[in-house]
Image (spheres, helix red, strand yellow):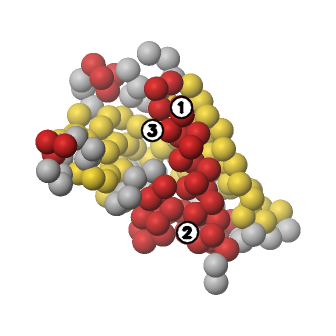
Amino acid sequence: MSLITLHFSIDIRAPKDKVWRTMFADNSYREWTSAFCPGSYFDGSWALGSKILFLGPDPDPDAKGVVGGMVSRIAENRLHEYMGIEHLGMVSNGVEDTQSDAVKDWAGARENYSFSESMGVTTLRVDTQTAPAYESMFNDSWPKALQKLKALSESA
């Protein structure tokens, strides 16, 4: 399966260090990513080379409250400038999978965040690779998530 790259951006009236902190701090991360899935959170570190899990309620009805999500690694981290994430696999019914055929179709997909600031306005650019089956969902969810991030970043 081939991956497609989607691009999103938003201007936020806040310094890029504040937007960065808002995007990656635990409590505010949970708020802005609720646009993708209420209950979303991360487990791990944003440090370069670190494993990080992006988790939430598993959509599988048999999971019965167990978490599901993505297994990823921080491929790049330039403070207040750029965050690069490489997706390695998925978590399903609480179990990490980085080897199945289903995962191999999209393993290595990247999600990158670029931050630039001019006159007190930060432009956040998101470039994310995904399977075509998820294009519509991301085209709907990313703008909503970025609006939530903007509101959080611009608040006092």
Amino acid carrying label 1: it is: Glu
Q: Dot 1: what SS?
A: helix
Q: Is residue 84 visible?
A: no
The residue positioned 85% from the left and 68% from the top of the image is: 119
Residue 85 placement, left or right of 62: right
**Three-letter code for the amino acid on which mark 3 is drawn:** Glu
Instruction: Tell me the residue that label 2 is attached to.
Output: 22
The residue indicated by pointer 1 is: 135
Which label's residue is closer to the chain start, 2 or 3? 2
Residue plotted at (25% across, 47% down): 58
Type of amino acid at the residue the image marks with label 2: Thr
Are there few (<14), some (14-19), or many (20+) residues within 10 Å of tag 3? many
The residue carrying pointer 1 sits among few (fewer than 14), some (14 to 19) or many (20 or more) residues within 10 Å by Cα, namely: some
**Secondary structure beneath label 3:** strand
First in sequence: mark 1 or mark 2? 2
| Mark 1 or 3, nearer chain start | 3
Q: Quadrant of residue 102?
A: top left
- Taking the view exactly as shown, the residue that stands out farthest to the front is 61
Give the Cα separation between the discs numbered 1 and 2. Answer: 25 Å
